[in-house]
Image (tube, helix red, strand yellow):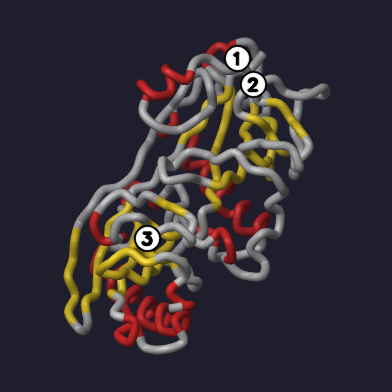
């Protein structure tokens, strides 16, 4: 019996461009949680309140790409049945891997970039960071680790406003090949003002992620400074937002905004800029239709 441990790392800075003026707002918006028990994200208190959960690997002791998994039992089910996770990578760690239980800081810089790269391949788009599809990383609990289990699992989830996996039906392999569609990331609050509460764009929102996610570099590269990120993000996001709206953003009364990674999240694979069209008042439905 194994208890899975998920971890999410998302540390970002935000800037907003209003007409021709650059307004910089430094924000740290992210979470880093190691949860024993039911494999969910959030605060340690909320995870403990959810109660314990068992991660039972199927016969053969592995999962396959495309397996859909329920969080309640950490069991593989048909993807047409309600589930939260969809596996796209399962890796057995070698026997030579250190016996001591790994810390997130020691493990994630090695495996999180692989999971992030694997997500874009699995969903079929480099714009995954502009969607509500996210990668979650799991590994055995301390007890299971000391009993001999050694594995890393990458799963794609559809997140809700609480940044937790939503229960859903249907497979996600190739879900973004034809564009962001129903998975486009919209935010209740302005993207420039803090932690993002992500919702489907059919719900009222003030931020709308657009296609054209910009990769600044590789995890092994030196992280971009704020000045470097802004220099490449501003023209790219202006073009991406105008192209998405099929007209200059000012015609829609939008602000050009973007979010980029802090240096401390760079080695985990967070090396992208996501552009957002931001509105003064909530809108419902995509801005392209307004």
Q: SS of the residue at dot 2?
A: loop
Residue under the point 58% across and 28% down:
139
Q: Nearer the viewer, mark 2 or mark 1?
A: 2
Q: Is residue 217 left or right of residue 146?
A: left
Marks 2/1 in contact by CB < 8 Å: the verdict is: yes
Residue at 59% across, 66% down: 181
Which element type, helix, strand or loop, lies under badge 3?
strand
Q: Quadrant of residue 256?
A: bottom left
Residue drawn at x 36%, y 71% is 277
Reading the image, the residue beneath label 3 is 205
- Seen in the picture, residue 130 relative to 105 is either above or below; the reply is below
Quarter of image, res 81? top right
Dot placed on the residue nearer the N-terminal end, 2 or 1: 2
Residue 156 in the image: state x and y as whole percent. 60, 45
First in sequence, mark 3 or 1: give its number: 1
- Alpha-carbon span between mark 2 and mark 1: 10 Å
Marks 3 and 2 sit apart, C-alpha to C-alpha, by 36 Å
Q: Choose mark 3 or mark 1, whichever is in front.
A: 3
- Name the foreground residue: 215 vs 76: 76
Residue labelled with disc 2? 55
Across and down, in percent, residue 262 comes to 31, 53
- The N terminus sits in image quarter: top right
Residue 223 location (% of width, % of height): 35, 58
Residue 66, labelled with which disc? Answer: none
Read off the residue under disc 1.
144
Tell me the quarter of the image containing the C terminus: bottom left
Which mark is nearer the camera, 3 or 2?
A: 3
**Which element type, helix, strand or loop, lies under badge 1?**
helix
Residue 245 in percent (x, y) is at 44, 81
Q: Crowding at label 3, few (<14), some or many (≥20) Cα neighbours within 10 Å?
A: many
Relative to 228, say whether 63 is above or below. above
Q: Is residue 25 left or right of residue 136?
A: left
């Amino acid at each position: 019996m194994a208890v899975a441990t998920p971890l999410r790392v998302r540390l970002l800075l935000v800037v907003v461009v209003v007409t021709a003026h650059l307004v910089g707002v430094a924000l740290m918006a992210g979470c880093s949680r190691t949860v024993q028990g039911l494999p969910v994200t959030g605060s340690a208190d909320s995870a403990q309140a959810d109660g314990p959960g068992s991660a039972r690997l199927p016969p053969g002791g592995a999962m396959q790409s495309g397996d859909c998994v329920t969080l309640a039992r950490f069991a593989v089910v048909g993807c047409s049945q309600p589930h939260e996770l969809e596996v796209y990578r399962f890796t057995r760690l070698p026997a030579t891997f250190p016996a001591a239980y790994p810390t997130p800081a020691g493990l994630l810089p090695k495996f999180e970039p692989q999971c992030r790269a694997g997500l874009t391949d699995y969903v079929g788009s480099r714009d995954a960071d502009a969607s509500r599809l996210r990668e979650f990383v799991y590994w055995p609990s301390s007890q299971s680790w000391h009993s001999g289990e050694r594995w890393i699992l990458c799963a794609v989830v559809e997140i809700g406003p609480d940044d937790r996996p939503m229960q859903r039906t249907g497979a996600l392999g190739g879900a973004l090949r034809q564009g962001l569609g129903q998975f486009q990331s919209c935010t209740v609050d302005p993207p420039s003002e803090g932690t993002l509460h992500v919702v489907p764009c059919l719900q009222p929102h003030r931020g709308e992620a657009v296609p054209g996610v910009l990769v600044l570099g590789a995890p092994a590269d030196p992280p971009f400074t704020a000045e470097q990120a802004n220099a490449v993000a501003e023209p790219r996001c202006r073009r991406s937002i105008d192209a998405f709206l099929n007209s200059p953003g000012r015609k829609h009364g939008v602000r050009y905004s973007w979010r980029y990674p802090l240096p401390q999240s760079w080695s985990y694979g967070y090396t992208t800029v996501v552009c957002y069209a931001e509105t003064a008042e909530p809108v419902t439905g995509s801005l392209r239709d307004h």
